[in-house]
Image (cartoon, rainbow, N blue to C red):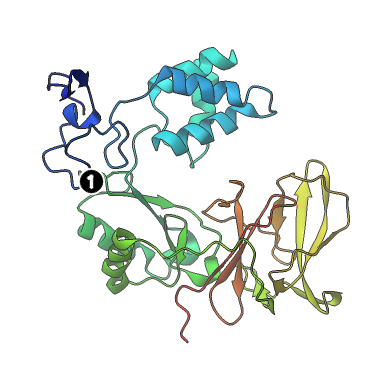
Amino acid sequence: MMNMDKPVVIIGKKAYRGLCSTCDNSATCTFPRDPNLPVMECEEFQGETISPEVTMSIVEKHEDEQGKLISILEEMQTRYGYLPESALKVVAEGTGQSLVDVYGVATFYRAFSLKPRGKHLISACLGTACHVRNAPRVVEEFERQLGLKPGETTPDKQFTLETVNCLGACALGPIVVVDGRYFSQVDTPQVKRILQRAKSGLDKTVVKADERIFPVKVRCPRCNRSLMDPAHPLDGHPAIRVTASFGTAHGALWLSSLYGSYTVETEDEIPRDAVLNFFCPHCHAELLGASNCAECGAPMIPMIVKEGGMVKICSRRGCKGHLLDLEGVNW
C-alpha cells in the first residue's frame, strides 16, 4: 500500500519521489540503501509502481512471436512478481485482444498470479502420493510457522504459501518446492530448517559448462522405474530413454547419461528451440517440474538419480541448461 501524501526526497535543488518516500513500509524496511539517495527500484516492497510505458515495451518486444501472450505475461510476472490489473489492461490494448481473453490465460496457468507474492514462494504438494505420507501435517506446520493459510503472503512480503496437486516427484514425497528447489521426504521438523535456508539463500548451482563428466542412472519421479536403456548406448553408456512430443510428433528420445554431455538422439526430427513435453515410457506420466531453466526460461524436467538427489534438464531443444540437485543426499 503506497501513501502518496508523504514528502518527496530533496537532493540539492532537485526533488525526487523515491519509493521510500511513498512506501508505508519504509520505517521498518531492512533493505540496504544509501540514506543520501532515493531508492527508485525496490526488491522488497514493490507497491503499485507499475509503469504503462514499461508494460507496453514488454508487449512490443514480443509482438512478432507466436503465442506472444504467454511470453508477455511471463516477462511481466518476472518483472513485477505478479500480474497487476493495470498492466493487464495495457496488454489487452497493445495486443488487440479482449481483457477477458487476457484474464483467461492469466488465470488458467498456476505460474501466474493476480496478486503480489512474497520474495520466497513455497509450493507444498498435497497429491495422493504425498497425502498418504503426511503431507497435510507438513502444510499445517508451514501454516503455524508462517502464521498464514495457503494462498496467503506474510505481512513482511517474505513468504507466500501455496498447495498444489502434483510436483512430478511422487516417489520422493512429501515434496516441497521453495524458489524452484526441491525438498524431498519432508517431515514437520524440517519445516523450520527449510524456512531458515530460504531466508539465508538457497545454494542453487546451475551448470553452464561442466568439464567433470560422469555417468548417472535415473528413474521416473512418478513410478520410480528406471529410465535407463542398455540396448541403446550413447557415449559408451546406457542412454536415458523418455517419450517426447512436439506438435503432432510423438516418439522416443534418448539422452546421454553422462552428466555434462549433450548428446541426444530422436526418432523424429525436432527443430532447434522447440520446447518439448517429456513422458515416462513406463507409466506414461508427463515429467513436470516446478522450476524453469535459468538459461532460457523453459520448464525443467526432473528425474531421480539412483544414488540420491535429482537431475533436471531443460525441455528446450538445443539449450544446455541442466542442474544436479543433491538435496538430502548423505555423503
Camera-nearest residue between 178 and 57: 57
Camera-nearest residue between 43 and 103: 43
Decide: is 255 above or below 45: below
Farthest residue, direction bottom: 331
Q: Where is residue 279 in the image (x, y as percent from the top left)?
A: 70, 58
Farthest residue, direction front: 12
Q: How many marks?
A: 1
In this image, 23 relative to 168: left or right?
A: left
Quadrant of res 117: top left
Q: How crowded is mark 1: few (under 14 residues within 10 Å), some or many (20 or more)?
A: few
Q: Where is residue 190 in the image (x, y as percent from the top left)?
A: 31, 72
Name the amino acid type tagged 1: Phe
In this image, 241 relative to 308: left or right?
A: right
The residue shown at (54%, 79%) is 308
Quadrant of res 220: bottom right
Q: Where is residue 115 in the image (x, y as percent from the top left)?
A: 35, 33
Q: In this rendering, does residue 98 appear at all?
A: no
Q: Position of residue 92 (x, y in %)?
A: 52, 16
Helix, strand or loop under label 1:
loop
Position of the N terminus by quadrant: top left
Camera-nearest residue between 264 and 217: 264
The residue shown at (16%, 22%) is 8
Q: In this rendering, does residue 79 appear at all?
A: yes
Residue at numbered disc 1: 31
Decide: is 261 above or below 22: below
Decide: is 12 above or below 331: above
Camera-nearest residue between 124 and 233: 233
The residue shown at (83%, 48%) is 270
